[in-house]
Amino acid sequence: MAHFRRDSGSREAKYSSLYIDKFIDELIENVDTYICSSQDFDKLMAFIQQLDAFVASLPISKDDELSEIVSKVPIRDKWYGGYSIKEIEKLNEKASDVCTQYYGFHFPWIINAIAKKMNILGNVDEAKVLEEISLFSEIGVYDIKSAKIYLSGIKSCECAMELAALIVTDDDLATPVKDQLMDYYDLLESGQTECSEKAYRWLKLLNINEGRVARRIIKKENSSC
């Protein structure tokens, strides 16, 4: 059985690139349609379904069984909805592979390749949308705020999405996301707000880790005096 992989040979890579070029105008149009929509969860899932169909049509080596599961089993909504692998596995015995091999690796690789071509063509806004979707796919969330919270150290998609709904972030990111998470943790500790026990544990762990980093920095600075 073929498996998803980056290095499928120069000839295959060339054919794939030419294939993307052939449909690039249609892809740009599809992205524009999404941009002009409400961009809610359902619209995003419908757009990703379109992208899934395009990825499946590419002339590259891939796991046909996983491609078939992607098209028929409702894993997509669960993965981007922040569900755990344990929950998603109940849908299909290969569901874990779909999440880790396909949505976590193969899909974002292709989508990033398309985004690069759009950037070259000057379609910067469209490219940014695809770059964000690629990131969402790797992590398993559906918005940039949740993705940044996850990347800041809350390594639970479910908790990242919960905190994204609770924390008011700066649109211009004047305050780093990690600092905002620490500020929210301080509010929790003072009893001024609340969250789930699981999210609290992740925030507490992040606070502990940040304290360790701060102590190492102070120790290094003192040793250099």
Image (tube, helix red, strand yellow):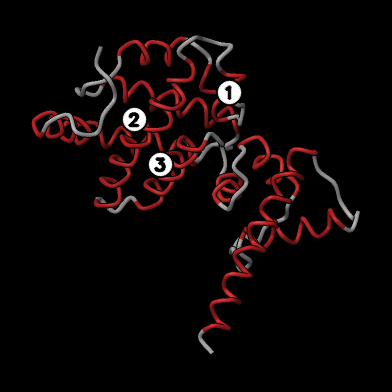
**What's the distance in space between the residues labelled 3 and 1, CA to CA?**
20 Å
Q: Position of residue 122 (x, y in %)?
A: 29, 54
- Judged from the image, the secondary structure of the residue bearing numbered disc 3 is helix
Q: Is residue 100 left or right of residue 205?
A: left
* Residue drawn at x 37%, y 30% as measured from the top left: 107
Do tag 2 and tag 3 residues touch (Cβ < 8 Å)? no
Neighbor class of circle 3 (other Cα within 10 Å; few <14, some 14-19, many 20+) is many
Disc 3 marks which amino acid? Leu
Dividing the picture into quadrants, the one containing residue 131 is top left
Residue at image mark 3 = 130
Q: Between marks 1 and 2, how big is the CA–CA gap?
A: 18 Å
Q: Residues within 10 Å of mark 2 (few under 14, many from 20)?
A: many
SS at mark 1 in the image: helix
Q: Which residue is mark 2?
A: 106
Q: In the shown orientation, is residue 16 left or right of residue 53?
A: left
Q: Which of pointers 3 and 1 lies earlier in the amino acid sequence? A: 1
Toward the front, the furthest residue is 223
